[in-house]
């Protein structure tokens, strides 16, 4: 093979594997040396690397071998030749035999000495490691050679040549003036372009340059050192077209990942494929075991995957890439590849960091002195309205003498800390590579009673059995224990504690204090929120064993067969426990209880596929055909007991009276076939097409199968002749793709039949239909059109990728949302409405990724990456007859109300409520304003109450009455765009990373204000703002409404609670230092790095709550950016080290 | 050739796994399906049994007393909170309890309808469909009661008789039907129940043909159809199958009284299963020192009003259902009361007495449906109970009869009316009366059915003017911390006839604009 194809070939090395134990049978007689190489090449997977120059003076060879080894054959062929060779991976690199000092005169005789100079030298990389196989060419001549195993070269250079060019895959090409030198040692720097990176696509991998669809990749470099428990967090702001936001700062808590907008109202979690095996089970806590109302329970889907084991993440963003995953790819596919050992290296690494975390900001709640003022004002107002005598609270008579009282936020939030330890062994020989790691991660959250501990072990092995067969295992064992602080619900610590009165103490007589009586009023709560937060234990234990084993056979040249079996076994162990706690005779937690929930999940899949990939001249063809099947089963058992003996945290200590049990078995299966065709012509035109057929158990026999096709094409403009002189455009590729993928939505188990649901009643057990069946249910379909370009500009200093897309979701699987009067509902014990295919939704958007290598010298480098994502989501159609999906949620006051409306023609999940028009300042104003729905009395609508706008009425026109017709969409939680900006600097041993991310244009529903600005009882603490700015007869210009305990009109969901959610966050700053080699050699280290890092350092935002990064409640797209006592993301400082032995 | 052999083996392996026809056949393995169910009496009775319980819960939780007693004036709430808008007649269309009530009744009715329709479909394949007919009749009864509540709470409401068809149709909107037609529909449903149900319950607590007749009497009375009300009440009285339970207080204070001789229809609760399948009333209305120590509860959210307290005649045994200073139950013990519960509104002083002291707005609690801590053997888990909720009892039938006889007359001395009326008074230990008037009967009903979520409907059916007269004269005030009466009335609050009914929930109008349009006739 000629050097010109060198670049192309080496890339396949990484994905096709061959063995040097291959048997060769050849009967060709005496043939020229070059022809002999071609014959050997045909029989093996080895490519010969040489230049025509080298062949000068070679002798013909005799090829007569029976089952000879490659080594034998080569030994014969090279005997007596002026050449020698070495084998690197699947290449046989030829080189002229070194010219010794003694031979030189001979050589000089053979060639005119006045025209040739002999130049020699060593080529190394930046770390001083010698590089074999580097091509060295005298510019403008045919004189060329490659370096040997020691990285050495010797080159005869005609005196006409002025410069040498050094080229090596993955390195920046280097051109050096020769001058008078005869010894030229060079250092090549790693290439900064990403075009040669390997991109993992479904069931295979290709070079970035050959990708024709929208795929984003990030490597371990981009995510290292970040103190995250789950890799999605580390991806935030780093991948265009992927919106990632934490659903809160709960250690191990849920993370909303949306690939290109909102694909379906049914959830947007992408498919995660780890080393070829789809991730089967997410986990969640059994939150309500303690009687709390709905709270955030989802956990990060990837929390069981140790981020330190991840080598790369590839995200398939458009359907032309996704379709090979068919019906599971509707929300995008995230392919995670874990680390594998490398040939020839043998190293032990130890990475660690320690961190501390704190709350970013506190809400400005009243202290006791302010609270007393507020009480005095308020009780006076209440007495006036009730026409009763105002009886002041004597203790509050002089607020100025009162201290600050209890700061409940101070009590609830703590300094969190975290540590991570990763010990990894990796290495390999020619035949086998291994990677094993042990990890320990431990984090205490910033809310008392929250944390995460994880232990994980990984073993990855790849082994060549013989010349044509290879197998490997990748496996991981994880034990993750999460201590959960319930958030975003009515009875959750944050929402209770924030509103607790500063008059109530946290502790009394060394124990948690009950409510306190002041002047006949009870402040605080007997169920002390800090007692709940610290003594109630909600844990989610997640134990996982994932393994997959594959075998790969080389059947013929270019044709491999791969068979893979994988399983994902998980044991989920959720516990709720609370002790009985009294303060004296007053119950704080009146009854002890424990609830245990165990789920065993087993997922296994089998896949078999054939891969064919060959190059014929300028044509490269790849074909793939295969099959995949999986089965998923889940078996759940739960039980609870009350009145635990001595508060022992065991179900055995509980009373059998009142015990409960529950559980169930679930199963699903899918069987699929898939195929793919790829064709590349002359590195200029490429074309890919794929088709997958999926059969799923979710659907009835008639609609069980779905077909998912895709096609895409690419044109590398810069490989055209006419582009060869383009100066500032080094690389340009245009891409077009279209494809269709599907989803099974939230169809539940067997929605095609009516299941019966057993309940226990006073007359004994009985069964009701659980659902209205839909035998015609079928797949959701998502079609994406994508156009993109990849460009490298200005001397390879700038890389730009731009993709525009349109994604259309049809046949969305929706629970038909029916009015309550049908008697068919969506509560757990309702007869459920039928699940139907309805609705259409469109996302259009732009993803831009721009990398600029601003400075790249040996001592200093500066790289900037900018990520921009924009999408617009429009709901086009819903069930016939309905034009809105309303989403109801329980607010901080435990009232269920409509929070969002997803209307046809508008984005999904917009906030829904009334529009305010200031505050009533006079009785006349009330009488001349629209009827607010209540009598005009002090207990109805009165001066100081919120005035709502009359927007519409039964006839579509304002009707002078404020009622449900006047509710409208009042804010879009979707941002106009999101962005991330990363700057990487290196200076000698130092590296500095500065990362900013944010969004613009999103809106937040600040539900917590229902409590903190609610002004509906005298017991809750309020924001200081209420004291200053609430309307009262004494403060007639107040901007907040008056105190009103008599009706809830002021607390209607309205734009009063909607805030701007735009923010810019200094997400991460990391400063690292690599110790010099000489220094660390004494400690037997080959590399050592120390770093300090700060996360979430500062947030620029107008949002008044704790944290504008809210995500979606349990990843539900219909309930996004609602702050209902959310767990704020903490600020983190870490210090860490990476050591290599 | 080894590699080809291997390949063939793999492909054989694949087919063994995924080419099997039933590989994708994975039905729900936790539940039976409709195709194979409701084929015997036990399955049908099990299903109808659930209609007596948990679907009603969202109404029974808070709306029941908010509407029946707080609006009616027999109960008051002490401060802001869920109940306050009912106290002030400022109930908005986004009120949580409005939605709870609406949802509960439609869920009850919808479930009854789905069962009824499923049973009808099963009749074709049943050899002897008697058990199916029985189930259908029970479902009709339940549906009737649910719509009766809807008509009384919301006046004009949608009627849905085939929810499955509606769910799959292109237009899910249903108009409001005029109240008179809804009541007519209720009567029709009760007639179906009357003819399909037996004379005696096949299981204690199940409804009988007399339950249907008694309920018809109540509906006719509400409609002002005194003839039919009298006739139906008469049928129940003449059957001799029902009588008053001897001890009024005991009837409400222990689950052992469940399904007694006085009960024609009661909701049936059971603890230890679904949360919504149990009776939680005592959690909401009971006193904290009694209930909080056994589990969070005893909120005293609704307490007897001063009007109610002042209405009892001296010696009325029914006053036992009011806990007031000195009221004791020696068999109710808990950590606060190891020697028995004593209702104490007077203790003051040390910090710890908070656990014992009861100082709520009227210094009383209702004892109805408060069965205590479970220390005496009543089934109590947490503070929830097995105690049935009476929806129709024989005392009601007797008073309906008396009122139906009175009809539109200003007074009556009809012996049969007096006999029925005085039977109720006799149990209370009160002397017989010789003449009955509307006001006398209403007052008797107010005391007899206090804290049973019923008095508001008695007020409501009098019409706005009379209702205003009744409500305006009530004392809805409270005693302040020092025991001084703070007078409260509703003269400024109850001012409009529209306040006789609650608004239709906003969320329902949002999805169905017809609910904001004028009501239309159901029967054309």
Image: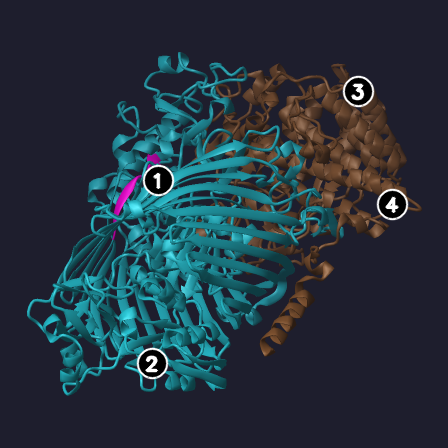
Chain colours: A cyan, B brown
- Give the spatial CA distance, label 3 vs label 2: 125 Å
Assign a secondary structure to mark 1.
Answer: helix
Q: Do dots 1 and 2 share one subunit?
A: yes
- Give the spatial CA distance, label 1 vs label 3: 55 Å
- Give the spatial CA distance, label 3 vs label 4: 35 Å
Q: Say which residue label 3 marks.
A: B226
The label nearer to you, 1 versus 3, is 1
- Mark 4 burial class by Cα count in 10 Å: few <14, some 14-19, many 20+: many
Q: Which mark is residue B7?
A: none
- Mark 1 burial class by Cα count in 10 Å: few <14, some 14-19, many 20+: many
Q: Residue A452's x, y, as percent?
A: 39, 64
Q: Is residue B20 visible?
A: yes
Q: Do dots 3 and 2 share one subunit?
A: no
What residue is at 79 percent from the left and 20 percent from the top? B226
Q: As rendered, which of A621 and A596 lies closer to the eye?
A: A621
Segment colored magenta: A1059-1067
Q: Do dots 2 and 4 share one subunit?
A: no
Q: Residue A813's x, y, as percent?
A: 59, 42
Q: Which mark is residue A1012?
A: 1
Magenta-colored stretch includes residue A1062: yes
Q: As rendered, which of A1091 and A1034 lies closer to the eye?
A: A1091
Q: Main secondary structure of the magenta part?
A: strand
Q: Which mark is residue B131?
A: 4
Q: Do dots 1 and 3 share one subunit?
A: no
Q: Earlier in the sequence, mark 3 or mark 4?
A: 4
Q: Which mark is residue A59?
A: 2
Assign a secondary structure to mark 4.
Answer: helix
- Give the spatial CA distance, label 1 vs label 2: 91 Å
């Amino acid at each position: 093979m000629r050097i010109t194809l060198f670049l192309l070939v080496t890339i396949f090395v990484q994905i096709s594997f061959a063995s040097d134990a291959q048997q060769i049978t050849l009967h060709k007689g005496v043939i020229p040396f070059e022809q002999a190489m071609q014959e050997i090449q045909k029989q093996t997977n080895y490519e010969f690397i040489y230049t025509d120059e080298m062949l000068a003076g070679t002798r013909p060879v005799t090829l007569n071998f029976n089952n000879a080894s490659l080594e034998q054959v080569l030994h014969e062929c090279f005997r007596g030749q002026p050449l020698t060779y070495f084998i690197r991976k699947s290449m046989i690199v030829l080189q002229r035999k070194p010219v010794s000092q003694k031979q030189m005169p001979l050589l000089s005789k053979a060639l005119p000495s006045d025209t040739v100079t002999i130049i020699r030298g060593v080529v190394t990389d930046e770390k001083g490691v010698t590089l074999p196989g580097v091509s060295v060419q005298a510019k403008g001549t045919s004189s060329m050679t490659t370096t040997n195993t020691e990285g050495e070269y010797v080159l005869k250079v005609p005196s006409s040549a002025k410069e040498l060019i050094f080229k090596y895959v993955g390195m920046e090409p280097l051109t050096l003036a020769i001058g008078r030198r005869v010894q030229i040692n060079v250092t090549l720097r790693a290439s900064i372009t990403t075009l040669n990176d390997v991109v993992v696509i479904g069931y295979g991998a290709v070079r970035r340059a050959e990708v024709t669809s929208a795929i984003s990749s990030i490597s371990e470099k981009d995510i290292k050192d970040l103190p995250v428990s789950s890799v999605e967090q580390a991806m935030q702001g780093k991948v265009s077209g992927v919106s990632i936001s934490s659903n809160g700062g709960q250690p191990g808590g849920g993370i909303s990942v949306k690939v290109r907008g909102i694909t379906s109202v049914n959830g947007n979690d992408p498919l995660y494929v780890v080393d070829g095996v789809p991730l089967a089970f997410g986990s969640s806590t059994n939150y309500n075991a303690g009687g709390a109302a709905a709270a955030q329970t989802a956990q990060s889907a990837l929390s069981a995957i140790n981020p330190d084991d991840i080598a790369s993440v590839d995200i398939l963003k458009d359907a032309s890439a996704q379709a090979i995953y068919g019906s599971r790819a509707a929300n995008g596919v995230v392919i995670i590849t874990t680390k594998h050992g490398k040939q020839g290296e043998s190293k032990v690494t130890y990475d660690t960091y320690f961190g501390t975390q704190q709350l970013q900001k506190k809400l400005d709640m009243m202290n006791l002195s302010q609270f007393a003022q507020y009480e005095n004002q308020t009780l006076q107002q209440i007495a006036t309205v009730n026409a009763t005598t105002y009886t002041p609270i004597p203790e509050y008579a002089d607020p100025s003498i009162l201290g600050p009282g209890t700061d409940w936020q101070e009590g609830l939030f703590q300094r969190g800390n975290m540590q991570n330890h990763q010990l990894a062994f990796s290495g390999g020989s020619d035949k086998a590579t291994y990677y094993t790691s042990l990890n320990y991660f431990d984090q205490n959250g910033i809310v008392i009673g929250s944390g995460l501990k994880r232990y994980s072990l990984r073993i990855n092995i790849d082994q060549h059995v013989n010349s044509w067969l290879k197998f490997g295992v990748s496996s991981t064992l994880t034990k993750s224990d999460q201590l959960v602080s319930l958030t975003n619900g009515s009875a959750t610590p944050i929402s209770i504690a924030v509103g607790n009165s500063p008059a109530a103490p946290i502790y009394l007589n060394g124990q948690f204090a009950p409510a306190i009586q002041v002047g006949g009023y009870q402040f605080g709560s007997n169920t002390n929120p800090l007692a709940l937060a610290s003594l109630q234990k909600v844990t989610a234990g997640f134990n996982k064993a994932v393994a997959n084993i594959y075998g790969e056979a080389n059947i013929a040249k270019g044709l491999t067969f791969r068979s893979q079996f994988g399983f994902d076994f998980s044991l989920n162990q959720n516990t709720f426990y609370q002790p009985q706690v009294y303060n004296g005779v007053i119950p704080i937690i009146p009854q002890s209880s424990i609830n245990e929930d165990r789920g065993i999940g087993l997922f296994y899949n089998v896949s078999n596929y054939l891969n064919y990939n060959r190059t014929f001249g300028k044509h490269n063809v790849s074909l793939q055909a295969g099959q995949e099947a999986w089965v998923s089963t889940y078996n759940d058992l739960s039980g609870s007991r009350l009145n635990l003996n001595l508060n022992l945290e065991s179900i055995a200590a509980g009373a059998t009276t009142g015990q409960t049990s529950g559980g169930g078995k679930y199963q699903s299966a899918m069987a699929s076939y898939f195929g793919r065709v790829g064709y590349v012509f002359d590195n200029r035109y490429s074309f890919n097409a794929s088709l997958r057929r999926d059969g799923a158990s979710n659907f009835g026999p008639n609609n069980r199968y779905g077909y998912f096709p895709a096609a895409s094409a690419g044109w590398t403009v810069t490989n055209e002749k006419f582009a060869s002189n383009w100066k500032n455009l080094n690389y340009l590729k245009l891409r077009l793709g279209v494809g269709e993928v599907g989803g099974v939505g939230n169809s539940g188990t067997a929605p095609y039949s009516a299941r019966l649901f057993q309940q226990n009643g006073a007359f004994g057990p009985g069964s009701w239909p659980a659902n209205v069946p839909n035998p015609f249910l079928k797949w959701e379909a998502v079609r994406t059109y994508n156009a993109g370009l990849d460009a490298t500009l200005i001397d390879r200093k700038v890389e730009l990728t731009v993709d525009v897309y349109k994604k259309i979701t049809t046949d969305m699987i929706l629970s038909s949302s029916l009015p309550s009067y049908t008697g068919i509902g969506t509560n757990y014990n309702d007869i459920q409405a039928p699940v139907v295919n309805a609705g259409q939704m469109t996302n259009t958007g732009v993803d831009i990724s721009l990398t600029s290598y601003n400075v790249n010298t040996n001592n200093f480098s500066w790289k900037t990456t900018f990520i921009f994502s924009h999408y617009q989501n429009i709901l086009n159609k819903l069930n016939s007859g309905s034009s809105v999906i309303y989403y109801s949620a329980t607010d901080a006051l435990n009232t269920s109300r409509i929070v969002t409306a997803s209307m046809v023609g508008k984005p999904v999940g917009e906030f829904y409520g009334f529009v305010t028009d200031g505050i009533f300042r006079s009785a006349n104003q009330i009488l001349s304003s629209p009827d607010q729905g209540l009598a005009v009395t002090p207990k109805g609508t009165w001066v100081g109450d919120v005035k709502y706008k009359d927007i519409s009425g039964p006839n579509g026109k304002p009707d002078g009455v404020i009622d449900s017709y006047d509710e409208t969409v009042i804010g879009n939680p979707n941002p106009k765009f999101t962005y991330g900006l990363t700057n990487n600097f290196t200076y000698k041993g130092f590296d500095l990373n500065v990362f900013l991310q944010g969004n613009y244009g999103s809106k937040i529903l600040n539900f917590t204000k229902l409590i903190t600005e609610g002004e509906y009882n005298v017991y809750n603490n309020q924001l200081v703002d209420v004291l200053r700015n609430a309307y009262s007869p004494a403060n007639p210009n107040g901007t907040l409404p008056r105190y009103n305990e008599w009706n809830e009109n002021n607390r209607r969901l309205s734009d009063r609670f909607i805030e701007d959610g735009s923010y810019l966050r200094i997400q991460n700053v990391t400063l690292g230092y690599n110790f010099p080699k000489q220094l660390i050699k004494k400690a037997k280290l080959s590399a050592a790095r120390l770093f300090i890092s700060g996360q979430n350092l500062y947030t620029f935002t107008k949002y008044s709550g704790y944290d504008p990064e809210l995500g979606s409640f349990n990843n539900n797209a219909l309930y996004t950016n609602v702050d209902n006592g959310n767990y704020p993301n903490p600020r983190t400082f870490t210090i860490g080290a990476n050591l290599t032995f | 050739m080894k590699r080809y052999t291997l390949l063939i083996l793999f492909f054989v392996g694949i087919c063994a796994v995924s080419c099997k026809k039933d590989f994708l056949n994975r039905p729900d393995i936790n539940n039976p399906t409709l195709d194979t169910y409701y084929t015997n009496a036990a399955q049908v009775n099990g299903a109808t049994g659930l209609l007596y319980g948990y679907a009603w819960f969202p109404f029974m939780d808070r709306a029941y007393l908010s509407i029946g007693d707080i609006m009616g004036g027999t109960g008051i709430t002490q401060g802001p909170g869920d109940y306050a808008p009912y106290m002030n007649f400022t109930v908005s269309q986004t009120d949580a309890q409005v939605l709870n009530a609406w949802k509960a009744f439609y869920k009850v009715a919808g479930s009854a309808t789905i069962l009824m329709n499923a049973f009808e479909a099963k009749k074709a394949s049943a050899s002897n469909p008697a058990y199916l007919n029985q189930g259908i009749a029970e479902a009709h009864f339940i549906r009737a009661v649910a719509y009766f509540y809807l008509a009384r709470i919301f006046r004009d409401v949608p009627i849905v008789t085939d929810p499955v068809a509606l769910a799959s149709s292109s237009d899910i909107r249903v108009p409001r039907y005029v109240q008179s037609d809804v009541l007519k529909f209720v009567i029709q449903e009760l007639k179906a129940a009357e003819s399909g149900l037996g004379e005696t319950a096949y299981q204690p607590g199940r409804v009988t043909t007399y339950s249907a007749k008694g309920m018809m009497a109540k509906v006719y009375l509400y409609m002002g159809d005194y003839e039919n009300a009298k006739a139906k009440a008469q049928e129940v009285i003449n059957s001799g199958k029902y009588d008053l339970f001897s001890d009024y207080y005991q009837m409400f204070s222990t689950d052992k009284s469940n399904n007694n001789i006085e009960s024609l229809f009661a909701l049936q609760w059971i603890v230890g299963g679904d949360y919504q399948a149990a009776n939680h009333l005592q959690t909401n209305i009971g006193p904290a020192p009694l209930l909080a120590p056994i589990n969070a509860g005893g909120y005293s959210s609704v307490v007897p009003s001063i009007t109610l307290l002042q209405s009892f005649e001296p010696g009325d045994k029914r006053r036992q259902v009011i806990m007031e200073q000195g009221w004791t139950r020696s068999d109710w013990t808990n950590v606060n009361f190891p020697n028995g519960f004593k209702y104490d509104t007077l203790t003051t002083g040390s910090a710890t007495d908070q656990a014992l002291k009861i100082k709520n707005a009227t210094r009383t609690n209702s004892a109805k449906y408060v069965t205590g801590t479970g220390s005496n053997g009543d089934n109590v888990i947490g503070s929830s109970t097995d105690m049935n909720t009476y929806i129709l009892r024989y005392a009601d039938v007797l008073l309906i009869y008396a009122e139906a006889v009175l009809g539109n007359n200003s007074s009556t001395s009809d012996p049969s009316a007096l006999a029925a009326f005085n039977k109720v008074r006799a149990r209370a230990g009160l002397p017989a009366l010789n003449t009955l008037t509307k006001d006398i009967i209403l007052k008797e009903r107010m005391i007899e059915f206090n804290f049973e979520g019923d008095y508001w409907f008695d007020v409501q059916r009098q019409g706005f003017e009379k209702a205003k007269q009744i409500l305006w004269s009530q004392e809805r005030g409270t005693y302040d911390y020092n025991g001084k009466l703070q007078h409260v009335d509703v003269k400024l609050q109850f001012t409009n006839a529209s306040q006789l009914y609650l608004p239709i929930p906003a969320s329902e109008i949002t999805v169905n604009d017809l609910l904001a349009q004028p009501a239309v006739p159901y029967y054309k």
